[in-house]
Each structure stands twice: as structure tokens, then as C-alpha cells.
């Protein structure tokens, strides 16, 4: 059973493949960091401007829209595989497939977003203590943000299929910068209170 399999391991590196892999993967590292900045910076700004109590209300409001992120993440796992597989077919077939999936994805996200928004008050009363009931007023805005974040993720799959990770890096960086600027500006206004 032990056939000394270590003899079959080679460390020969194909420089062309390595170069292609690095060209594709290296821009994804900062892009992932920028996605993280976009998703967590809000909490730090709310906490910094208004304190831990407001941050608790924000966290409570954030619970329900997270359902959209869960649905989107599960979908994206399957979608990226299908998108890459379908890209090998005829260009027009690929465009048609992409359009059909995009329409279905939009419908599901808007439907779930509408349900989350419509049920936000009863659900927040079931899921949280009375001190956090005011979180319900923030759920529609956070739900809309989650829907559009899911759409951005879907559109970003084009970069995956086309192996344009540099474009993904650039758009994610710009999104993170805009997010931080809008956080600084909007959280302190009447939209944030």
C-alpha cells in the first residue's frame, strides 16, 4: 500500500503558467481587502461617531439584510462555475445565458429584499430586545445596500470569466473609497441618525 508516492512529486515550475496565475491572482488580494473595508467600515464609523449603543442598534438592523448576503453567496458559488463553463460555448449563447440568469437573480434579490423590508418590524421584535426595536427603521436602507452589493458581485463575475482581475481590483478599490467618503459624510447627517 505504501508505494513511496513521494517519488512522484516534482517541483518543476512552468514559468508561463506561474506568470499567468500570478497576473490573475495578485490583484485579487487587495481587492478582497477592499471588499472587507467596504463591508465593515460602517460599524467603525457608527461606533466612532455615536458610540457602542448606536453600534448595537446598527448591528441589530444589519441582521435581517444579511439574509440577502447569504442567498447571494450561495448563488455566486454556483454561478461562477457555470459562467466559466458557459464561456467556452458560442459567444451569443453565453450572452443569452448570462442575461437569463441576471434577470432571475434580480427577481430573487428584489423579492427577498421586499419580504425582508415588509417584515422588518415584526421580525426585529421577535429577534431582539425592546431596546433594539428602533433598528427596524434602518433595515430598508441596509436591505437596499445588500441588494446592490449582490448585483455588484454578480457583475464582477464577468471579470472572473474574462480573467480581468486588474479591473476587479480597480472597481473594488474605487467602491471602498466611495464607501468611506459616504460614511464620513452621511452617517453624521439626518440619514445616519
Image: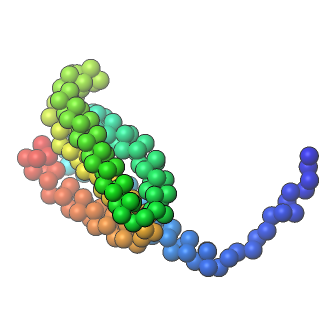
Count the marks: 0
Instruction: Identify the residue at image location x=29%, y=40%.
Output: 108
Most distant residue in the left direction: 190
25 or 87, nearer to the observer: 87
100 or 135, nearer to the observer: 100
Instruction: Identify the residue at image location x=70%, y=75%.
Output: 13
* 145 left or right of 21 in image: left
Q: Is residue 35 above or below residue 54?
A: below
Instruction: Identify the residue at image location x=80%, y=64%.
Output: 9
Q: Is residue 64 above or below residue 89?
A: above
Q: Is residue 18 visible?
A: yes
20 or 175, nearer to the observer: 20
* 169 left or right of 17 in image: left
Q: Quadrant of the C terminus?
A: top left
* Colour scheme: rainbow
Rendering coords of residue 149 (x, y %): 29, 51
Instruction: Identify the residue at image location x=9%, y=50%.
Output: 189
Q: Quadrant of residue 178?
A: bottom left
Rendering coords of residue 126 (x, y %): 27, 20
Amino acid at each position: 500500500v505504501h508505494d513511496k508516492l513521494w517519488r512522484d512529486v516534482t517541483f518543476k515550475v512552468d514559468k508561463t503558467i506561474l506568470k499567468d496565475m500570478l497576473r490573475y491572482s495578485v490583484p485579487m488580494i487587495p481587492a478582497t481587502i477592499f471588499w472587507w473595508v467596504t463591508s465593515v467600515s460602517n460599524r467603525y464609523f457608527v461606533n466612532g461617531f455615536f458610540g457602542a449603543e448606536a453600534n448595537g442598534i446598527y448591528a441589530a438592523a444589519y441582521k435581517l439584510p444579511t439574509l440577502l448576503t447569504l442567498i447571494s453567496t450561495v448563488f455566486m458559488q454556483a454561478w461562477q462555475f457555470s459562467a466559466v463553463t458557459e464561456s467556452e460555448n458560442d459567444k451569443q449563447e453565453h450572452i443569452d445565458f448570462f442575461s437569463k440568469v441576471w434577470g432571475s437573480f434580480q427577481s430573487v434579490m428584489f423579492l427577498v429584499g421586499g419580504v425582508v423590508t415588509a417584515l422588518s418590524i415584526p421580525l426585529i421584535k421577535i429577534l431582539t430586545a425592546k431596546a433594539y426595536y428602533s433598528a427596524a427603521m434602518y433595515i430598508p436602507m441596509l436591505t437596499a445596500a445588500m441588494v446592490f452589493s449582490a448585483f455588484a458581485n454578480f457583475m464582477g463575475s464577468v471579470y472572473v470569466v474574462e480573467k480581468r482581475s486588474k479591473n476587479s481590483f480597480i472597481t473594488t478599490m474605487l467602491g471602498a473609497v466611495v464607501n468611506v467618503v459616504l460614511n464620513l459624510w452621511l452617517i453624521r447627517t439626518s440619514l445616519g441618525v
